[in-house]
């Protein structure tokens, strides 16, 4: 098995996928921004390109973030179950279409978040990384596990142990 490369999950933010928002004429990144930001404004004569909006409460930091397309890295779209991790855990054996659908699964696997927090998470799971925003940790762990279950991806022992610890504190 060759190592992970982003392009093995299809064109970045393609509209050509089988999930929510697929084949609607808008790329996945803009679909996620439009769905998860408030006060969204679009580029003139566009129903797709988000130029501004507000992430009222960033899940990973708890902070409010004003999104401007000119500073697009301030709000990034995170794969709850990271692509590189998925590759290593079995996605390397999937069909191209399944990998593309996974990478663009807005309903389960994608979340608009603070850019630096997403960078600090990198390709880690809950065994190595948890959001600074403690109020979101239960949701983060549960969503991670849901994605793993949906795609029949294993979790590491460290992820399992972290999930047990965190879920004991969930309401």
Image: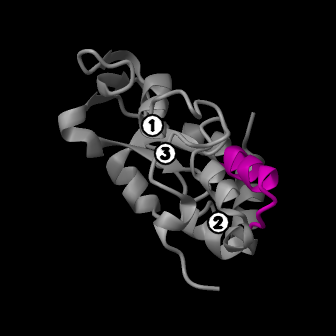
Looking at the rendering, the stretch of residues picked out in magenta corresponds to 141-155
Q: Which residue is mark 3?
A: 14
Around disc 2, counting alpha carbons within 10 Å, would you say few (fewer than 14), some (14 to 19), or many (20 or more)? many
How far from the left and from the top, in percent, is residue 56?
40, 23
Q: Which label number is shown at residue 86?
A: 2
Does 107 appear above or below 116?
above
Q: CA distance from mark 1 to mark 2?
A: 22 Å
Task: Answer whether residue 124 is visible to the viewer in this image.
Answer: no
Q: How many marks?
A: 3
Around disc 1, counting alpha carbons within 10 Å, would you say few (fewer than 14), some (14 to 19), or many (20 or more)? some
How far from the left and from the top, in percent, is residue 65?
32, 31
Task: Answer whether residue 42 is visible to the viewer in this image.
Answer: yes
**Camera-side residue of 8 and 78:** 8
Q: Which residue is mark 1?
A: 27
Identify the main secondary structure in magenta.
Answer: helix
Of tags 1 and 2, the one toward the viewer is: 1
Around disc 3, counting alpha carbons within 10 Å, would you say few (fewer than 14), some (14 to 19), or many (20 or more)? some
Q: Is residue 151 magenta?
A: yes
How far from the left and from the top, in percent, is residue 132?
46, 49
Q: CA distance from mark 3 to mark 1?
A: 5 Å
Q: Secondary structure at mark 2?
A: helix
How far from the left and from the top, in percent, is residue 170?
73, 40
Left or right of 123? Residue 118 is left
Instruction: Kindly identify the residue that appears in the image at 73 percent across and 56 percent down.
Output: 163
Name the N-terminal-most of marks 1 and 2. Answer: 1
**Camera-side residue of 127 and 85:** 85
């Amino acid at each position: 098995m060759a190592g992970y490369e982003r392009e093995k999950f299809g064109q970045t933010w393609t509209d050509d996928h089988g999930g929510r928002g697929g084949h609607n004429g808008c790329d996945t990144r803009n679909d996620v921004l439009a769905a998860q930001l408030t006060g969204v404004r679009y580029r003139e004569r566009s129903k797709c390109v988000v130029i501004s909006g507000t992430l009222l409460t960033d899940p990973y930091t708890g902070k409010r973030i004003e999104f401007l397309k000119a500073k697009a890295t301030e709000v990034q779209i995170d794969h709850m179950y990271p692509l590189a991790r998925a590759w290593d855990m079995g996605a390397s054996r999937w069909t191209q279409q399944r990998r593309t659908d996974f990478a663009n699964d807005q309903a389960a696997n994608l979340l608009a978040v603070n850019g630096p927090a997403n960078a600090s998470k990198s390709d880690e799971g809950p065994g190595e990384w948890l959001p600074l925003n403690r109020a979101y940790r239960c949701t983060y762990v549960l969503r991670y596990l849901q994605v793993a279950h949906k795609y029949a991806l294993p979790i590491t022992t460290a992820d399992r142990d972290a999930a047990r610890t965190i879920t004991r504190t969930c309401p």
